[in-house]
Amino acid sequence: MVTDRPDPGLYPPDRLDRAAAASAEAGLAALLLTPGPDLRYLTGYDAPQLERLTCLAVPAAPAGGKPFLVVPRLELPAAHASPAGGLDIEIIPWDETDDPYALVAQRLGALPGPVGLSDRMWALMVLRLRDALPGARQELASAALRGMRIRKTPAEVAALRAAGEAIDRVHARVPDWLRPGRTERQVAADIADAIIGEGHARVDFTIVASGPNAASPHHEVSDRVLLAGDAVVVDIGGTMPSGYCSDCTRTYMIGEPPPEFAAYYRVLRDAQQAAFAAVRPGVTAEAVDAAARGPIAAAGYGGYFVHRTGHGIGLESHEDPYIVSGNTEPLEPGMAFSIEPGIYPGPHGARIEDIVVCTEQGGERLNNVTRKLICVDAT
Ligand code: ZN
Ligand code: ZN
Ligand code: ZN
């Protein structure tokens, strides 16, 4: 059995105790976490999401008991081999004819308050836990875990930095694959191979939006053939073996840019830089959004910037904090998020995206591949 125990600094063993304390503070009696980012954050266990129940129960401190992990018997060796096996957690297997929900309820006993369920738990499990624990109101585990996950530790920032470097290496190779006559899908396949080749464990998305498709912010990929004169928005990301995600957008040009494109691309670059320069502790998330929007609106393209400026990133590629008008949360050191303004006037569009982490001194970019417009040979 391969044991894959990553940097203990990345998944420190005291997280369970801190989560138990945070649960009490949030008024929860226990956390119930099925496979996904919350479970991985607390234990390092990258458990598969199956119809069979895997569930970590973390009773709130100090009244509750010790955390325990209920797993299908066939997952027991993997659970023991995972970082969870090195933690002070009782791992309890269940057999095919057992009722694992009843097992969880029986081990928890009478609960003095609500349970916090992992935000990404399947409805299948939410409803069965509701039946098994009829006295416990269900809330979101993020009530307890959000405050922990949103402030990245130095080890987490290092993991995000490694993810950023890996996706930068992919972007550095993209110009080679953008040739007139190739399709978006062919380019995306090259990118997917390189995302793995440059060190990710999983490809999360490969957006290749060319020509008129570049004017659609969440266009993914199609069989459209690349043509000379196309702008191509390439927004790509994956998950590293550490569990941490990358996400970076660059806009490329095939041949020479139309003058109106060159004009707003320059505005976009300034806007992305202005938002980056606004990052420091105490500045609100919405002030960073406003800093990106300012130069774009001033140049008359405000109506073409149709999405928020960014999203947090960590074990999920979209998580708190969201960089959006209305989010008055002040930035703190350790918060990591994208800054990705876009301008989509049609018949083309552009977006530039970097992951940025807030430090005591200001922002640190985790993507450093050039933001200059790269024009590839159209012949
Ligand atoms: Zn997105
Ligand atoms: Zn992106
Ligand atoms: Zn993004």
Image (spheres, rainbow, N blue to C red):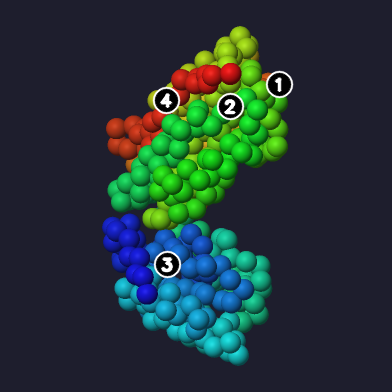
Residue at point 46%, 49% (across, down) = 196
Horizontal relation, residue 178 to residue 9: left or right: right
Task: Return the residue at label 4.
Answer: 370
- Inspect the image, locate mark 1, and give the three-letter code of the amino acid beneath it: Pro
- Residue 294 in the image: state x and y as whole percent: 54, 20
Tell me which label, 2 or 3, sits earlier in the chain: 3
Please identify, in this view, whether the residue under mark 3 or under mark 4 is nearer the observer: 4
- How far across and how far down the image is residue 324, in percent? 56, 36
Q: Which mark is residue 246?
A: none
Q: Earlier in the sequence, mark 1 or mark 2?
A: 2
Quick check: marks 3 and 4 in contact, CB under 8 Å?
no
The yes-or-no answer for disc 1 within 8 Å of ligand 1 is no
- Residue 149 vertical placement versus 351 (above, below): below
Q: Which residue lies at the image location 63% right of the left edge and 31% below the top edge?
A: 182
Residue identified by numbered label 3: 45
* Dots 4, 1 in contact, CB < 8 A: no
Rendered location of residue 332, percent (x, y) = 37, 41
Label annotation for residue 347:
1
| Nearest the eye: 310 or 169 | 169
